[in-house]
Structure formats: C-alpha cells, structure tokens
Amino acid sequence: MYGICPAAGRKERAVMKTRIMVKEGEYRLTKAGVMDARIDAEELYCFMNKCDKVILFLKKEEEVDKETEERYFELIARRASRIPLQHITGVQEFMGFQFKVGPDVLIPRQDTETLVEEAASTIREMGKDVEKKPLLSRLRKSEDIKVLDLCCGSGAIGISLSKICSDISVTAADISLPALQLAAENAAALRTDVEFLQGDLFEAIAQGKRILPGGRTGRGRGTKTRDFDMIVSNPPYIRTNSIAVLQEEVKAHEPLTALDGGRDGLDFYRRIVDRAWHWLKKDGWLLMEIGYDQGEDLRKLIKDNGNYTPAQVIKDLPGKDRVVKCRKK
Ligand code: GLN
C-alpha cells in the first residue's frame, strides 16, 4: 500500500511516523494533480485531529496507529478525486470568520476580500459624513446604513460587512434556497442579524420571501425602492465557454449557477447596472466584484446607463482589476 512515495520507502511498514504519512498524502495529491498538495495534506491531518499546524509540527516524529492511518488516507483519497478541500472540511475562512460551505454555494475566495474591504472603508467614510453634519440633522438621521448583498451565496460578503461595520443593516438575496439556508445558518453561527431574501436578483427585494435559520420562511420587512445606501455583489461572471477550462474542483463541484455569467460573462452586470439605481438612495454606492479582464466593459456599461458617476476600477492584492465602484447620481 505504501511505498508509492519515496519518503515512505519501498517496503511495507508496520508503523508509520506522522511526518511520513503526511508526506505520502502530499505525494498522492500531487500525483492526482491537486494544486496545493502539501498545504492540503497538512490541512486534512489537522481536520482529522481537530488540531492546528503547530500540533502537527510537534507530533511529526510520533508514530501513527493503523486506524488513524486508514482514516487519513481515506480523506486523501477523497481530495485526490478532486473534491474541494472545503467540501471535505465543510468550512472556509473569509475575512477572519469561519463560514460553513457546501456544494450549494461558491466557496468564498480570497479575491473577494478586496470587495469587502473596499465596501467597509466606503461605509466608514459614509459614517464620517454623517458626523460632520450639524447635531440636529445627525439626531434626525440616526438610521442605520442599509446595505444589500445581491447573489449572496454562503453570505460571506454581507455577513462579514455586518460583523466589521457598526450601524449598518444588511439584506442579502439569492435565487437559491439551499444557498440562503446555509447563509442564514452562517449568520446565526456568527451571531449577526442579516435579512435573507429569496428571488431572482431584485425580485427578491420586491417580493420579500424571508429565509430563516432551520429552513423556515417568513415575510421580509418590506423594502421600498430607493432604500439602500449601498449594493454589493459578486455575481456569476465566468464566460460560458471558459467553464470547461476551470479546475476540476470548481467545474465539477461548485454550483454552475454561481459561476456562469453568460456568453460574454456580463449577463448579471447588465441586469444589475440596469436596475440597481432604482433601489439606491441618491449618492448610494454600487460595488461589484469583476473578472480581471472585465474592468473596461464595466466602465462602459456603467457610463452608458447614465444613472451613475464614472466607475472606478480597484485592484486586488496580486494587482489585477477586481472591483468596480460607482455612485448613483
Ligand atoms: N472568482 C471565481 C472563480 O474564478 C468566480 C466568481 C464568480 O463568478 N463570481 O472561480
């Protein structure tokens, strides 16, 4: 059984050291074409033992029993079949919070933290604008800043904003009921109050079917038009014929509805740009994640609509265009 990996040696062994077992795991993942084989081999060990990497380091010379070894290589085999690591562990960290994930939602990407950080700093600036106003109008305007997260999936964007910004109220919408049920669970586990509505883009807001933790449904709080100070969205934006070249983990295990943006990848942007202004207050912000090569298309879409200020394109940490931001005129 062992001996595939040079580190494990060629002969059968009665016992194996942790270090050798994890090395063998890495080797099997590499052979299966998994990108971050070492990281994933270590993560699966930590997941199995409910420990962190420091413990793995401390235990690396310890011998593992047969049963542990079998359980570990079972996890490795699942990952080697290209099931995403997060579908095995059931979680993904995003903005420092743990989100439950599964096949019904897109796994939150680090790229998307750029959108959350930009939205959060814009919200902070809005708060400062209120502080600059005379006391009387400040007292009158003691309402929360209202944020809408469209195509919320696991809820990562809206829930993170609701955790890191004070004085905001977040509504999150998605077309997928199972996604919303998971998102509602995430909000409850992270102890934050977010309203979840089901429907196709802005129809969710207009109709207001509210999804509560545990799969119950209720009525929304009756959102009016021109109600939001900010709309954020990470809509599906991959071109239909680029789906085939995505990694196996993504194309075979993540929901296509969260990825496929139509022939040119812009279908959802067209619909959002077309209607977002109707739901925004005057001077309200629209922020969306975009693909690295969609900045110019979005600048043009937003300009041609005529209801927004010129779009600003913001880069992610690796320096690629990642977020588009504009304001309702
Ligand atoms: N960034 C994601 C990916 O490359 C796509 C996210 C999306 O379509 N909104 O897999």
Image (tube, helix red, strand yellow):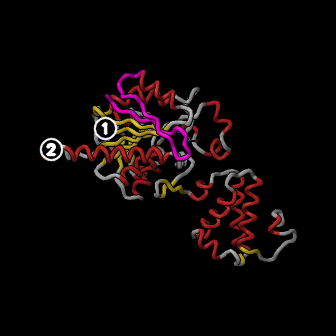
- Compared with 293, 93 (above or below) is below
Residue closest to the far right: 11
Q: Is residue 102 left or right of residue 232?
A: right
Stretch of the chain drawn in magenta: 304-329
Residue that label 1 marks: 228
Residue that label 2 marks: 134
The three-letter code of the residue at mark 1 reads Phe
The three-letter code of the residue at mark 2 reads Pro
Does the numbered disc 1 mark a residue whose Cβ is under 8 Å from ligand 1?
no
- Compared with 143, 28 (above or below) is below
Q: Is residue 98 left or right of residue 169?
A: right
Does the numbered disc 2 mark a residue whose Cβ is under 8 Å from ligand 1?
no
| Alpha-carbon span between mark 1 and mark 2 | 23 Å
Q: Is residue 31 left or right of residue 318?
A: right
Q: Residue at x 68, y 60 (%)?
A: 38
Badge 1: residue crowd in 10 Å (few <14, some 14–19, many ≥20):
many
Q: Earlier in the sequence, mark 1 or mark 2?
A: 2
User: Is disc 1 in contact with disc 2, using a CB cutoff of under 8 Å?
Assistant: no
The answer to which of 102 and 234 lies nearer the viewer is 234
Badge 2: residue crowd in 10 Å (few <14, some 14–19, many ≥20):
few
Task: For residue 175, say whether it is visible.
Answer: no
Q: Residue at x 55, y 30 (%)?
A: 265
- Which marked residue is nearer to the observer: mark 1 or mark 2? 2
